[in-house]
Image (cartoon, grey):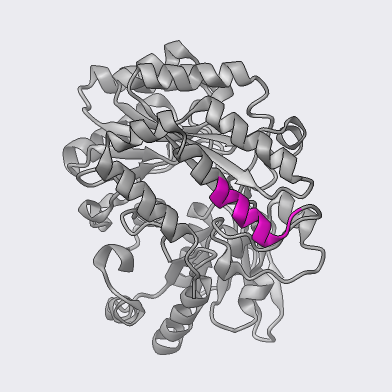
Amino acid sequence: MAVNPDLLYPPIELAHVASVLEAEGHEVFIHDSDAEGKDADAAFLAICGHEPGFVVLDSSSTSLERDLELAAEVRNYLAVPIGILGSQVSYTPDEIFEGDKVDVVIRGEPEYTVRDLAARIAAKEGFEGVAGASWRRESGEAVHEPDREKIQDLDELPLPARHLLNNQAYRFPGIEGAITTVKSSRGCPLNCSFCGYTLAQGLRFRFRSPDNVLSELEDLYHNHKVNHVVFRDPIFSTRRDRVLDICNGMIERGLKIEWQCETAMKVLDRDLLEVMAKAGCRHISLGVESGNDEIQRKHCGNKVADHEQAKSVFVACKDFGIETRAFCMIGFPEETPEMAEETRRLVEYLDPDQVQFCAVTAYPGTPLYKMLSDGRDFNYAVMTGYRALEGNEHMTAAQIEAKIKQFYRSFYLRPKRLARELAHPRRLLSKFTRYLTLFKERA
């Protein structure tokens, strides 16, 4: 279930895979049920109607059960190999095979693994030796091939196959018109204990050249008529010089694109933010995570070591017309209620335009998951990040959720803040609706 029905991102992972397959001469199509407003039955008919020789499904934690059911139905009807990709299945392939619903799990970066699997299928050969793949023998034995090395030169990948998507269907709350996502880099050296970005992308920062990124932006702007972009890089401004080249290139090429990104405060400064704003940056999401120094060092990549420098970033964003959102988390293993209060005080001091409080969630494969799993079973379907799955030694799950609600009220009901929010009633209504949605029971 989506937290916000007004948010719909394109399946950019599949678009990247599709472009590589097309470059190899394969005929490819992408079906996106969410974009088409169709249910699982309609997805089944759409997929089978193309009579493909190989089907690959993207997956997420909350939809995994439904994804696997659809995979099984398609597999039974078409009798062709079915693959599945996604950060969770990369780290739980044995569990995925238990129901005998898919033939192969694509682990890690998918582009070249899917390419090699498709070549094997076309040649009527088996999957043995395909790096990054997990598959099963006829005996039922699971075979986990070695991990595939990360793609070192991201510029060698073709641009995503957006001609296979309904690009006008994707949307973001508060933005009029179509949006899309761009991945201009991969990997993050910060290695936060809870973060799923590095599961497929790794810790080493790898980036596309400014010219390569600008080519994709030109394709979006001129060929697909999309002028709202969400950069999905883990830490967009890791390389300051690269960001400056991208921004200056957008200005020089007349790309009137409004865009947003996620990054860390310690890799931003006032001069860089001014250029980003001139190039169309309208929103930045920033990882605050925790106001406690110990938790920052142990779990959060020490992204907020200097509170004054962090404050200067939020002030500069406000000066240049860039809206800010602060990501915060409650319920780290060692966190006491007093430590959580430090997070509340810090985010109120930073005073972003928006704040998002989440319950700490141990996604499969993350360092936090390895720290906490200890043989326990986790219900992946409720891993939304908006409900506490369990407590820690200092707070119960109910107490963590109560803290989150309390902190939302404390942040938005401050007199000065409330006056600012009342000046924008439509935006306030949107935030209030989203706040209520966060804590609805999910089936």
Q: Residue at x 54, y 64 (%)?
A: 61
Q: Residue 23: give x, y in percent of width and height.
A: 36, 51
Q: Is residue 370 left or right of residue 223?
A: right
Q: Residue 266: give x, y in percent of width and height.
A: 58, 22
Residue 434: quadrant of the picture: bottom left
Residue 110 sits above or below residue 228 on the image: below
Of the pair 155 and 383, the residue shown nearer to us = 383
Q: Residue 184: give x, y in percent of width and height.
A: 43, 35
For the image, the number of numbered tags is: 0
Of the pair 46 and 268, the residue shown nearer to us = 268
Q: Residue furthest top?
A: 271
Q: Residue 342: give x, y in percent of width and height.
A: 67, 34
Residue 336 sits above or below residue 342 on the image: below
* Magenta residue span: 395-406
Of the pair 231 and 241, the residue shown nearer to us = 231
Q: Residue at x 65, y 54 (%)?
A: 400
The reply to whether residue 235 is visible in this rendering is yes
Q: Is residue 335 magenta?
A: no
Q: Residue at x 55, y 34 (%)?
A: 206
Q: Is residue 217 left or right of residue 71?
A: left
What quarter of the picture does the N terminus occupy?
bottom left
The reply to whether residue 264 is visible in this rendering is no
Residue 41: quadrant of the picture: bottom left
Q: Is residue 397 magenta?
A: yes
Residue 272: quadrant of the picture: top left
Of the pair 405 and 305, the residue shown nearer to us = 405
Q: Residue at x 32, y 69 (%)?
A: 33
Predominant secondary structure in magenta? helix
